[in-house]
Amino acid sequence: MAPSRLLSSARIARRMGLRWTGARLLYELRRRAGVLERRTPAAGWDRWSLPRVAPSLAAGGLVATLRALPSPLAPAAGGPWPEGEPGDPPPAPPVPPGWESLHWSRIPDLGGIDVKRFWEPARFPAAYAAARAWRHRGDAGPAEEFWRAVAAFRAANPPNLGPQWMCGQECAIRVLAWTTALFALRDAPGTTGERAAALLETLAAHGDRIEANIGYAVLQKNNHGVNEALGLFTLGSLPIMRDIIAVRAVKSRVEGDVGYLRVISFTEKTYDDLEAAITKIKEEVPADKLKGYVLDLRLNPGGLLDQAINVSDAFLERGEVVSTRGRNEDETRRFNATPGDITDGKPVVVMVNGGSASASEIVAGALQDLRRATVLGTRSFGKGSVQTIYAVPVEQGVDGALK
């Protein structure tokens, strides 16, 4: 490393702190090792096609479904859309040769290119212009231009390829514009099922891209984290998007000869996601090469008791996982593991920290007490309560739920 760069790195470390500097270096190592490329593969739009990810939506009637939904962002017809039109964005500089076919994590620094001039035209200010024109004046012309612009963007920017996917904040800005247009233009003449489906697919791909690297946005300690969080919140607030973007309770990857399992929360699907993740790791790494697993429970606030038991049982052959004690003696219950370690007895390391609570502490404690895993990290949160869902009959055969 050149002396000038070494000096600059030392100044940054002194200003930002060793913790931030270490996290930044780790991110750079993951980027160069191709971890981000494997997490957000350049698989084309087919990966996000509605018939594949949400068959119930692709079956037809998509526009009618959109029109029936309450709009979380766009005012109803005649509502207070602000007047005025955005100015035309400046022309974008040409893309350096070859960049359009590179994965976003492999593209070098933009260097001397004016980033605002490069990304601003793709922020879709025309989405707001089209929304105002249709809601205020009933003018469908700008709406037609918007739909054509979406088609042009998809044609020029396949998922995760090219510089338009480099910045999660830019993806979030597009999410806000497109979501506004999707609801504002849902009753415009040019809004067809095919166009709406294409936009939903594009939104889903953007949500996946933002979520995959949200840690880097938080690391910046600036408006990137806020904007990207807002983009994900916006997508999560749309009921129709929940059928497309399946929220995973477990994330996994292979690091060399070790399987990494990140349990985010204990929901109804945690064990199923864990089982699928371990199966995938076994398919990627031969049994004689796989040295073991890391079970990451850091910042896991817990969740359902039965899922904590099932996750613990996945790594155990026998032994008591946990016992619960109620106010009455007859409410005391004990839960034991059953034969069948789905990791085939491979070594396990469990990671915890101050954000690990409740169900995650049950898992860590059970695996440690039964000498099945080594627990590493800092003191966990120490919450002793757990959640159990009970069905509560409401009326006309409809059940509610009580935790």
Image (tube, grey):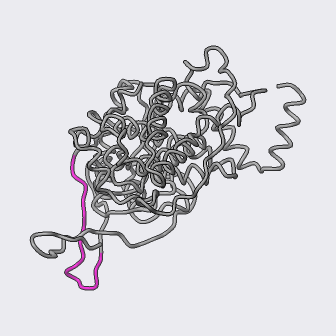
Tell me the residue at 51%/54% (across/down): 298
Quarter occupied by the N terminus:
top right
Tell me the residue at 41%/60% (across/down): 76
Outermost residue toward the left in this view = 396
- Residue 394 is at least partly visible in this image: yes
Of residues 45 and 274, the one drawn nearer to the viewer in this rendering: 45
Of residues 157 and 308, the one drawn nearer to the viewer in this rendering: 157
On screen, residue 240 versus residue 100, left or right, reads left
- The part of the chain drawn in magenta is 325-339
Is 147 above or below relative to 397?
Answer: above
Of residues 14 and 330, the one drawn nearer to the viewer in this rendering: 14
- Residue 270 is at least partly visible in this image: no
Q: Position of residue 218 (x, y in %)?
A: 62, 50
Is 375 above or below relative to 386?
Answer: above
Residue 120, quarter of picture: top right
Q: Position of residue 376 (x, y in %)?
A: 53, 51
Would you say residue 338 sits in the magenta stretch? yes
